[in-house]
């Protein structure tokens, strides 16, 4: 009898857990669907549907796009929006990599087309254009993952007793796993929440964490079993200033992180201009 009760309790718990998982998936899917629909309405489909656009509707569309890159600015006047190069990425319904989009944006500017950029690119006069510098296949393949509010929880890191650990699992952050040569990136939100993850070129970048929203600081770091070893304020997406980096250092000090042996690099605009070419600045650290 006792064994039968235990089985019922287990099945009940298992069912509840599955329902909770489904609820999370639905929540994330709806967020992505609504985000896509809103951006699509403000870019491609608007031009296709509306015959005449009023001044009010133009401002409404502009607010939709500006809100995407300005989210969080009200909480930190020094916060960084996405660099101009990557605004296109944030307002693109598909979030195609901003660096790639810019090749087509330049082509659109030179064409002097009267069609809005995204309409021109996907539906209008430019839909057949295939650039050598960035073929269509690459443009469509490299889409940046923008995390939903629920999705970013898995990347949230807290600092306890000076050590970095994942908020959800309680496990220490460790970026130098055996055989791993990847780059680990971070952003500090304007609400002072820290998010850390492994960078994947063309799919997961600094803009992923806050879905293109503003940050207090962004960069790269190396952490071994919760202990910070190195940090750099390098981000092509956000281009943090020296003041932003100082704010991040203050955040670390407030959380009792020992910085006496932490490797740091100054803010370098030259490095920001090519986020993919940071290897020279980081060389040797992962091998130590």
Image (spheres, rainbow, N blue to C red):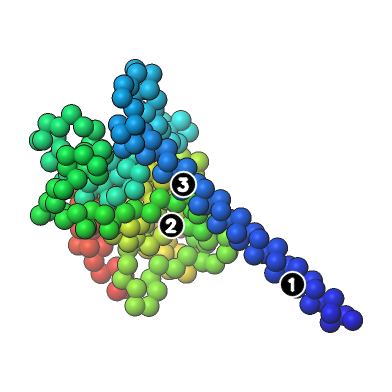
Q: Position of residue 52 (x, y in %)?
A: 31, 21
Neighbours of disc 2 within 10 Å: few (<14), some (14-19), many (20+): many
Residues marked 3 and 1 touching at CB (< 8 Å): no
Neighbours of disc 1 within 10 Å: few (<14), some (14-19), many (20+): few
Residue furthest to the right in view is 1
Identify which residue, 131 or 145, lies in the foreground.
131
Residue furthest to the top in view is 55
Going from the N terminus, do you reach mark 3 or mark 1 first? 1
Label 2 sits on residue: 196
Kindly identify which numbered label has been placed on residue 194.
none
Alpha carbon distance from label 2 to label 3: 25 Å
Circle 1 SS class: helix
Work out whether 131 lies above or below 14.
above
Alpha carbon distance from label 1 to label 2: 35 Å
Work out whether 15 lies above or below 38.
below
Label 3 sits on residue: 33
Work out whether 251 lies above or below 41.
below
Identify which residue, 240 or 195, lies in the foreground.
195
At 38% from the left and 78% from the top, the residue drawn is: 178
Q: Is residue 77 left or right of residue 118?
A: right
At 34% from the left and 36% from the top, the residue drawn is: 45
Quarter of the figure with residue 112: top left
Quarter of the figure with residue 212: top left
Identify which residue, 28 or 182, lies in the foreground.
28
Label 1 sits on residue: 11
- Between label 1 and label 2, give the one nearer the viewer: 1
């Amino acid at each position: 009898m006792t064994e039968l009760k235990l089985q019922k309790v287990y099945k009940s718990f298992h069912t509840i857990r599955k329902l909770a998982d489904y609820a999370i998936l639905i929540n994330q899917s709806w967020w992505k669907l609504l985000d896509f629909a809103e951006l699509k309405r403000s870019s491609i489909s608007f031009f296709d549907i509306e015959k005449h656009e009023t001044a009010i509707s133009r401002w409404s569309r502009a607010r939709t796009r500006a809100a995407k890159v300005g989210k969080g600015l009200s909480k930190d006047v020094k916060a960084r929006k996405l660099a101009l190069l990557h605004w296109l990425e944030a307002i693109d319904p598909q979030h195609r990599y901003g660096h790639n989009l810019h090749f087509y944006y330049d082509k659109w500017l030179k064409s002097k087309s009267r069609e809005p950029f995204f309409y021109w690119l996907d539906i209008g006069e430019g839909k057949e254009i295939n650039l050598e510098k960035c073929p269509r296949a690459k443009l469509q393949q490299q889409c940046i993952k923008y995390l939903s509010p629920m999705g970013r929880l898995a990347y949230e890191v807290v600092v306890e007793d000076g050590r970095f650990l994942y908020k959800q699992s309680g496990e220490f952050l460790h970026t130098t796993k055996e055989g791993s040569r990847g780059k680990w990136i971070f952003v500090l939100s304007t609400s002072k929440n820290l998010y850390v993850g492994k960078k994947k070129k063309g799919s997961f970048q600094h803009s992923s964490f806050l879905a293109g929203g503003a940050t207090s600081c962004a960069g790269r770091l190396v952490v071994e079993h919760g202990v910070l070893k190195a940090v750099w304020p390098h981000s092509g997406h956000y281009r943090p200033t020296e003041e932003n980096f100082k704010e991040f250092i203050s955040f670390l000090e407030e959380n009792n992180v020992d910085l006496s042996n932490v490797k740091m690099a100054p803010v370098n605009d030259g490095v920001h201009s090519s986020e993919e070419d940071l290897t020279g600045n980081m060389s040797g650290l992962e091998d130590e």
